[in-house]
Image (cartoon, coloured by chain):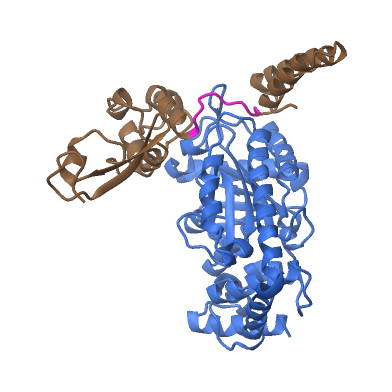
């Protein structure tokens, strides 16, 4: 499969269609599964790892929802292509590093995907627009059932699905939402609001995941534990917390758009638009900050020469791997910043 | 800041411990941290995580004898260093200390979610849910709403509401 073709396809989650999409960029549900009686990938022999890959690919072909999915073998890809898949949320950085007998199955509109031989034998994922964790769990749950008809999963009556890291044992579930919180950022409430979340059984990370700084006012909120409550109960806790965050963010946005604050916000937004329309060289971090303000303005219904789906897509298209994919070759940072600025000028002209 | 244990050396190990829902700030010097059997003294990611989550299970778990998983050859000491298990059988091989670890991470030690299609556990869950639904119907018919609410909570816990 030519990965560069994927540049032409829209990512399902980028379409601003889901509930509360003006704040919740995307929701994601992940289920970790392992095959019974096999060492986990980190301790597996090359032969055993290859066997898991071929069994998993065969099982995926039989799963109804993955019938039209593309199977990608990591060892057949260039490094730029692997980075491209990481940026599209289809594989993890870990999978991009260890390529032998590693694979990913990607469903239509990139909504469902299945990583094979990452930290666990299988990592099934559903990602879509807005606050839609319940719907995504229904979808992944059904694929999981289909897979478990072909594969025997490691399962313990007390500890549930067994995972390579005990933090994932139990349901193997991680339910997360990528939320855009520029309003809480600009009104100075963000730290107080996020601090309060840790008591509610959720964890908050920056856009890139663990241990990285926050880019473009985007935060990931996910469940803190995976064993004990049923999947739907874990999902409902995350949904409730995110629902509250949405309300707080919308209130903050409204207060920013009113009265004298409104002029300051307008200034901020149009300065950002000016940069995006005119910059000749721009880093990913800087472009994300400006895109964040444009996204805020669009959600307030302002007339800006851009659409919400284009801005959503740009949060991925402006990343280094995508810029290189667009160029068709590896680029140094300077070349990427130059090409990114041209891309942005085109999108905002 | 001086070490809160010896009060002599500069404290360089800082952590918070939750004891009976109270957060306590602990500051130790390197020597006291090494000699004390303390959460956070271990460097492995999982134990670092555990210490953040409120400290290691005390006593027995902190110093288990080095168990071996016969299926994959992983030693418990290796799990302590990396936080990663070797194979599904490790869960049985290290059941003693691991059950404490699981409890510590998740605050629960019994899976309440789904089971693989066709497995005996799945059938058990389905049967339990069917019985509860039947009882719920009766409770609603009898207008015993307190009982109905209780039954609905149990169904929810099975993930079948």
Residue B114 magenta-drawn? yes
- Outermost residue on the right side: it is B141
Residue drawn at (65%, 27%) of the image? B115
Where, quadrant-wise, is the N terminus of chain A in this rendering? bottom right
- Position of residue B64 relative to residue A97, above or below, is above
**Residue A338, quarter of the rendered image:** bottom right
Which of these two is toward me, A31 or A194?
A194
**Residue A295, quarter of the rendered image:** bottom right
- Position of residue A336 relative to residue B95, above or below, is below
Question: Is residue A201 visible in this depiction of the protein?
Answer: no
Residue drawn at (54%, 22%) of the image? A158
Q: Position of residue A346 (x, y in %)?
A: 70, 84
Residue drawn at (53%, 26%) of the image? A159
Which of these two is toward me, A77 or A165?
A165
> What's drawn in magenta, residue-wise?
B106-115
Q: Position of residue B22 (x, y in %)?
A: 40, 34
- Position of residue A345 relative to residue A42, above or below, is below
Magenta-drawn stretch, dominant element (helix, strand or loop)? loop
Report which colour depicts chain B: brown
**Chain shaded blue:** A
Q: Position of residue B24 (x, y in %)?
A: 34, 38
**Residue A272, quarter of the rendered image:** bottom right
Question: Is residue B40 visible in this depiction of the protein?
Answer: yes
Which of these two is toward me, A230 or A301?
A301
Residue A118 magenta-drawn? no
Would you say A127 lies left or right of A168 here? Answer: right
Which of these two is toward me, A116 or A202?
A202
Q: Position of residue B135 (x, y in %)?
A: 79, 12
């Amino acid at each position: 499969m030519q990965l560069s073709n994927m540049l032409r396809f829209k990512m399902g989650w980028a379409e601003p269609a889901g509930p509360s999409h003006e704040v919740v960029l995307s929701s994601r549900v992940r289920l970790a599964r392992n095959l019974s009686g096999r060492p986990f990938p980190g301790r597996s022999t090359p032969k055993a790892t290859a066997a898991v890959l071929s069994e998993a690919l065969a099982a995926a072909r039989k799963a109804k929802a993955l019938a039209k999915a593309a199977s990608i073998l990591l060892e057949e890809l260039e490094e730029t292509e692997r980075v491209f898949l990481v940026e599209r949320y289809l594989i993890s950085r870990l999978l991009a590093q260890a390529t032998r007998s590693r694979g990913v199955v990607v469903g239509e509109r990139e909504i469902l995907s299945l990583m094979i031989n990452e930290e666990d034998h299988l990592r099934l994922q559903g990602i879509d627009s807005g606050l839609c964790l319940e719907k995504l769990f229904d979808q992944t749950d059904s694929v999981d059932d289909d897979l478990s008809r072909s594969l025997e999963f490691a399962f313990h009556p007390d500890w549930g699905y067994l995972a390579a890291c005990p933090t994932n044992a139990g349901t193997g579930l991680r339910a997360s939402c990528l939320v855009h919180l520029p309003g809480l950022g600009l009104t100075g409430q963000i730290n107080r609001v996020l601090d309060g979340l840790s008591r509610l059984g959720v964890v908050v990370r920056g856009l890139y995941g663990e241990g990285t700084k926050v880019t473009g006012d985007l935060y990931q909120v996910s469940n803190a534990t995976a064993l004990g409550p049923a999947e739907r109960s874990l999902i409902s806790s995350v949904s409730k917390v995110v629902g509250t965050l949405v309300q707080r963010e919308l209130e903050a946005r409204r207060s920013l758009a009113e009265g004298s604050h409104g002029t300051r916000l307008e200034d901020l937004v149009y300065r950002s638009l000016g940069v995006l329309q005119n910059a000749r060289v721009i880093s990913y971090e800087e472009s994300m900050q400006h895109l964040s303000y444009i996204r805020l303005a669009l959600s307030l219904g302002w007339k800006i020469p851009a659409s919400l789906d284009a801005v959503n897509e740009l949060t991925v298209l402006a990343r280094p791997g995508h810029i290189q994919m667009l160029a068709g070759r590896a680029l140094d940072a300077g070349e990427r910043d130059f090409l990114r600025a041209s891309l942005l000028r085109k999108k905002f002209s | 800041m001086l070490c809160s244990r010896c009060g002599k050396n500069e404290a360089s190990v800082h952590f918070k411990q939750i004891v009976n829902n109270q957060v306590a700030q602990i500051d130790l010097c390197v020597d006291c941290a090494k000699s004390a059997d303390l959460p956070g003294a271990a460097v492995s990611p999982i134990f670092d995580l555990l210490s953040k989550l409120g400290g290691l299970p005390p006593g027995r778990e902190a110093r288990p004898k080095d168990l071996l998983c016969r299926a994959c050859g992983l030693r418990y000491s290796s799990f302590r260093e990396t936080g990663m298990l070797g194979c599904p059988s490790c869960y049985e091989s290290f059941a003693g200390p691991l059950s404490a670890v699981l409890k510590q991470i998740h605050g629960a030690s019994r899976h309440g979610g789904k089971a693989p299609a066709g497995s005996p556990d799945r059938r058990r869950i389905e049967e339990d849910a069917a019985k509860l639904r039947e009882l719920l119907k009766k409770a609603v018919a009898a207008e015993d709403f307190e009982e109905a609410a209780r039954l609905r909570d149990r169904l929810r816990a099975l993930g079948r509401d």
